[in-house]
Amino acid sequence: MSFYEVIQFKNYGFNFFAYPPLIVGVCIALLGWSVAIREKFLGISLTFLLLTSCASFWLISFFMVYSSVDAVTALFWAKVANTAVIFIPSFFYFFALTASRSLGQKSILAFLALLISEVFLISLWGGDHFLISVRKYFWGYYSVYRGASYPFLAFFMLLSLESFRIFWKCHRKYGKNTKRFKTFLIGFAVAYLASVDFFAAYGIPVYPIGYLPVLFFTGFMAWGIWRYRLVDITPSF
């Protein structure tokens, strides 16, 4: 699909269901940038900005998917949206390592996680191994996954669980700092419920309400960051 075709207004229409993910996507982008600016773009704030930007990109892209009036346009934006989805677990893991100050010890694993995400990215854009087409639901078009998506789901789950384990370990270990890591545990645990969006990609007609857990994540993490300051949500040595 050419760029000229993508920007044609005739390929898009009003869809009520498209606006909630757009609003949440904008909110989470503002959160990421406000934290990065407030913390003067220090290392951990940059990883948080990277994660929130990826989540924002995913949600805003699905606004375009739902607004598409034809399958060809929707498929293009579905691939754009899934580009962000593919990197979310890697960025989540990278953020967890940075927050726990263990990135230096596990830099090879972080690099390997990004490399695996790039392999899935190639399968997404290099053919129909990951995303075969789009399907029309009552809320609009949605991705249809195939073969390569199954190992990605395993990768997504394992890396997310490892990130949770890192936060839990810090929560148990660092005494007075435990409330800070508890904020991360609750925020990301709720955000992980956004995985419900995968159901529709496999033909299960469940409305993708992933933007709601992400909305909670945005508000809760904003509260936690303003209270504890992100640069301080790291172990004190």
Image (cartoon, rainbow, N blue to C red):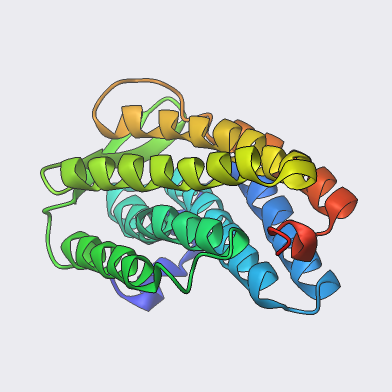
Check the picture and name the quadrant holding the N terminus. Answer: bottom left
Q: Residue 66: x, y in percent? A: 47, 43
Check the picture and name the quadrant holding the C terminus. Answer: bottom right
Instruction: Judge whether 56 appears above or below 6 on screen.
Output: above
Instruction: Judge whether 88 appears above or below 94 on screen.
Output: above
Look at the image and tell me whether residue 215 can be seen: no
- Is residue 160 toward the left or the right of residue 143 in the image? right
Image quadrant of residue 146? top left
Image quadrant of residue 121? bottom left
Instruction: Judge whether 122 appears above or below 71 on screen.
Output: below
Q: Residue 92: x, y in percent? A: 49, 55
Residue located 68% across and 60% down the image: 29
Q: Residue 6: x, y in percent? A: 40, 67
- Is residue 136 toward the left or the right of residue 207 in the image? left
Residue located 50% across and 47% down the image: 166
Q: Nearer the viewer, residue 67 or 21?
A: 21
